[in-house]
Image (cartoon, rainbow, N blue to C red):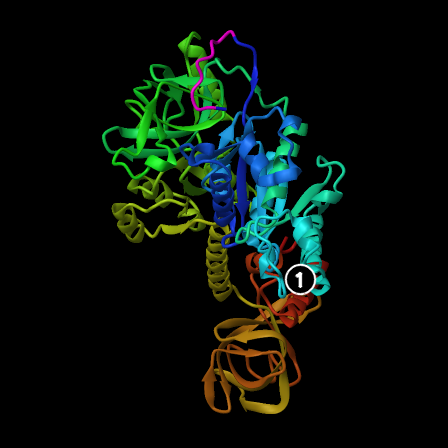
Amino acid sequence: MSDAHTTDAGDEAELRTPIVAVLGHVDHGKTSLLDKVRGSAVTAGEAGAITQHIGATAVPLSTISDIAGRLVDPDDFDLPGLLFIDTPGHHSFSTLRSRGGALADIAILVVDVNDGFQPQTLEAIDILKRTQTPFIVAANKVDTVPGWNPNPDEPIQQTLEKQSDRAEERLNQQLYEIIGELSDNGFSADMYWRVQDFRGNIGVVPVSAETGEGVPDLLTVLMGLSQRYLKEEMSIDVGGPGVGTVLEVKEERGFGTTLDIVLYDGTVRADDTIVVGGKNDPIVTEVRALLQPRPLAEIRTEKQFEQVEEVGAAAGVKIAAPDLDDAMAGAPVRVVRDRPLEDVIAEVQAELAEIDVVTEEDGVVVKADTLGSLEAIASALADAEVPIVRAEVGDVAPRDVAVASTAEEGKHQAILGFNVDVLEDAEREATESDVKLFVDDVIYQLVEEYENHVESIERAQQEQVLDKIQRPCRFRILEDHVFRQSSPAVVGVEVLSGTLKRNSRVVKWEGNDTTRVGELKSLQDAGDDIDEARAGEQVAASIDGPTVGRQIEEGDELWTEIPEKHAKILEQELSEDIPTDELEALGMYLDKHRKRDPFWGK
């Protein structure tokens, strides 16, 4: 389909180009694969055979047929070709939203045959699941299999026939590991030529972005799936008012702030009024210019873009218009044309409201570069049960620090930034107000860094609480170890269970009640002062209050007194943080008290 249409709005529906996104782990070859498809497309036809769009590359059916050879007969297809999103990765994928989900109609998940599934592969799979986007797996780097004999640009089954048994066996082993990992993640998969129903099974296409092997198959499967399952969705009113998504908001010399958009329905014209999702309210503005990159042959000229009068879906285009400073990546763009302006504004607001970020009274501040990634990180934080107090698109600014610093809980005094910069003032203010900044361009790493931070805060808090809480201890006065009878009594003791600490009150059980006998002032081990003694240790204890032979005797079992409030905290909040023997001493202490009062310490 050409970039410009002169079709009238009354014309019947036409089929648009399916939009293809490329996802996968870093270094698994997403960009190389895109480059290979583009390179093959240029080689297959003239330089004009493919159209460079803003943020996308259109490869027409005739060129796909040239690359795929006998695998694709153009007469079998009505669809005009494929539109590849140029910026690969799930980051751009989640930016590209359309009504109610992902903008991409179909996706390629690139997996390195040597590395298999990596953290970002799993993250990409989660996003594909959440958006219910059909996808195929490109098992890349088959040319790195030991003993591989490359056959550039050949279909995969053809080149497989020319490999040694050993090389083929090695590759099959790696491919079946990938199929196994897909199965672990809830997807039934097989080599694409064995898949009967692509709706129920994922097709795996072995490829090499380096040699081009398997690229014909990849394009064939994408075309076949689009033709078979997406044809209805590709039907659009070509002359209707355009609908698209903002890919990027960019400053462009001579044009000011511009929008790079992907148009997925209708047309946009050079004098249209458009409504764009903004940071506060929808923006209503007039299109001043529609810009497309110049053809590849002319790209060396000073003027990077040429102006066009009209662009039809599916296409990537740059829009120059006034008042775009507050426009957001990932936001909807709609052409007004002959409809009431209020209705179009309401549609844009409704679409923005679909972006599901639940905020709470207290929580962390989240910043992301686009609406799509804001939604993705909010979803990851919801899974990790991390509340959000505020979520916005844009760099981390001083006002974000001001919000984070007022959080009630210390662990919520934090800002999580995905793929954004931190403004200088904000960094300084964060340091001064003790707000923690976490910035990353991988969502799971960002969430992990924050969770580790929370863990260390909680550990420190528990240690502090434990320090202030009276710990349970049962100990016994040793026979023949009375060093002083009173003022204070100094006796040898053995710790039976728990932790014996200085400055503890000492009690003795008589029936189901305790009698306080004094205060443990100091502990000594081999003449050295110590702060505490643990189960199994024998030490000298100095107890202020009792006299040996009156209140206490050799062989007596004594306890440190635990206030009821402390007993409750130990049992209900800190039971996992104290040693087993201390827990045992606590249990015995509670049992004795509860014989007298069943609700003691509850």
**In the image, residue 78 lies at what x, y percent?**
61, 24
Label 1 packing within 10 angstroms: few (<14), some (14-19), many (20+): many
Is 5 inside the magenta-drawn segment?
A: yes
Residue 14 higher or lower than 386, as above or below: above
**In the image, residue 343 lies at what x, y percent?**
45, 11
Residue 597 in sight: no
Residue 409 in sight: yes
Residue 18 higher or lower than 268, as above or below: below
Could you say whether the residue bearing mark 1 is in a helix, strand or loop?
A: helix
**576 or 430, which lies in front?**
430
**In the image, residue 513 lies at what x, y percent?**
66, 65
Give the quadrant of residue 371. Answer: top left
Magenta stretch, residue numbers: 2-10
Q: Which residue was labeled with disc 1?
A: 590
Residue 432 higher or lower than 467, as above or below: above
Is 513 inside the magenta-drawn segment?
A: no
Residue found at x 47% / y 55%: 449
Horizontal relation, residue 303 to residue 444: left or right: left
Horizontal relation, residue 297 to residue 445: left or right: left
Looking at the image, the residue that sits furthest to the left is 254
**187 or 392, which lies in front?**
187
Residue found at x 66% / y 62%: 590
